[in-house]
């Protein structure tokens, strides 16, 4: 496996592994099979077979260490010293006043502003991204769920690829369902010898309910909670939880109560 940032090994560790491969080559010369080499050197059979193939094609030279994998870092010592000084100033000095957190995305932005060189979000931001390409997958955490950051949900941060909640003048609704037992859990208690302990608990029916709800938010409006509760009575043929028509009824009621478009975030 190839690892970034110097292969994940120090120079001493790479030299130690190279020595193991050289020992394997000596055993190959003696006619020792790869499974026996793996057993003697305490390595996997896969590694032993791979070393044997390289040794057979290129001799001992093919087992020499190739050094750190990946491209060398472009962060020169001067760059690193400058970056360390800038990070000590804090994010606010570079325009991020909403909090005092350094993220990889922000560090990459600081470097790009100073050296006009885009960087990927690597462990040390050392590998430049090719022109016209963007990093696949989610970006660095943006702190959307932190306290004081929830207003960004109404400002186009939730769906940057299409129409946003604000563009549609819609309510942003988060839907979820949960079940709950109302009966108290079983527990041990005590009493004096000869006196049966009595524990009172309010419970009726099956003691189980299902709850489906919507948390509805819109910029400039009071946040709303709309929910429906289903009580189970342990009757024959009784439905076990909310069905599709029940959710449709809940959404219809929410649409009428809110009086506007709804963008639904569904947790399935």
Image (cartoon, rainbow, N blue to C red):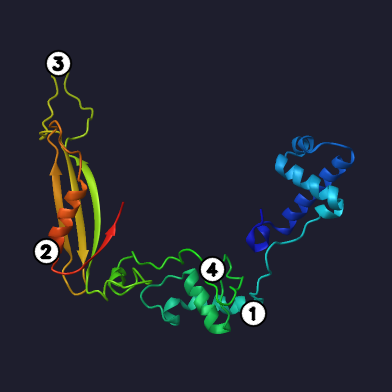
Gap in Å between the C-alphas at discs 1 and 2?
62 Å
**Which residue does the numbered mark 1 point to in the structure image?**
78
Gap in Å between the C-alphas at discs 4 and 3?
70 Å
User: Could you tell me which secondary element the residue under label 3 belongs to?
Assistant: loop
Q: Residue at x 51, y 74 (%)?
A: 107
Q: Residue at x 55, y 76 (%)?
A: 132
Q: Residue at x 84, y 51 (%)?
A: 57
User: Could you tell me which secondary element the residue under label 4 belongs to?
Assistant: loop
Q: Quadrant of residue 206?
A: top left
Q: Quadrant of residue 196?
A: top left
Marked residue nearer the N-terminal end (4 or 3): 4
Gap in Å between the C-alphas at discs 1 and 3?
83 Å
User: Few, some or many C-alpha atoms within 10 Å of disc 2 (few <14, some 14-19, many ≥20)?
Assistant: few
Marked residue nearer the N-terminal end (2 or 3): 3
Q: Residue at x 14, y 51 (%)?
A: 228
Of marks 2 and 3, the one in the foreground: 2
User: Could you tell me which secondary element the residue under label 2 belongs to?
Assistant: helix
**Which residue does the numbered mark 3 point to in the structure image?**
194
Vertical placement of 77 versus 56: above or below? below
Q: Position of residue 214 (x, y in %)?
A: 20, 58
Q: Quadrant of residue 234?
A: top left
Of marks 1 and 3, the one in the foreground: 1
Of marks 4 and 1, the one in the foreground: 4
């Amino acid at each position: 496996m190839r690892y970034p940032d110097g292969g994940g090994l120090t120079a001493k560790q790479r030299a130690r592994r190279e020595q193991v491969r050289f020992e394997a080559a000596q055993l190959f010369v003696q006619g020792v099979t790869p499974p026996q080499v793996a057993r003697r050197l305490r390595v996997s059979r896969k590694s032993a077979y791979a070393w044997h193939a390289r040794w057979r094609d290129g001799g001992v030279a093919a087992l020499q260490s190739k050094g750190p994998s990946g491209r060398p870092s472009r962060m020169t010592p001067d760059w690193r010293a400058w970056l360390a000084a800038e990070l000590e100033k804090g994010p606010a000095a570079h325009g991020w006043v909403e909090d005092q957190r350094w993220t990889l995305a922000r560090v990459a932005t600081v470097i790009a502003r100073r050296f006009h060189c885009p960087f990927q979000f690597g462990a040390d931001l050392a590998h430049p991204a090719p022109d016209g390409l963007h990093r696949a997958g989610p970006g660095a955490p943006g702190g959307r769920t932190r306290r004081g950051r929830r207003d960004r949900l109404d400002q186009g941060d939730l769906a940057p690829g299409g129409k946003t909640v604000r563009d549609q003048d819609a309510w942003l609704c988060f839907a979820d369902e949960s079940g709950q037992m109302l009966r108290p859990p079983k527990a041990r208690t005590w009493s004096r010898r000869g006196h049966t302990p009595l524990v009172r608990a309010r419970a009726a029916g099956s003691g189980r309910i299902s709850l489906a709800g919507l948390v509805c938010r819109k910029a400039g409006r009071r946040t709303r909670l709309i929910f429906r509760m289903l009580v189970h009575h342990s009757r024959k043929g009784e439905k076990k939880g909310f069905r599709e028509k029940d959710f449709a009824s809940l959404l219809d009621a929410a649409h009428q109560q809110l009086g506007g478009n709804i963008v639904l975030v569904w947790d399935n």
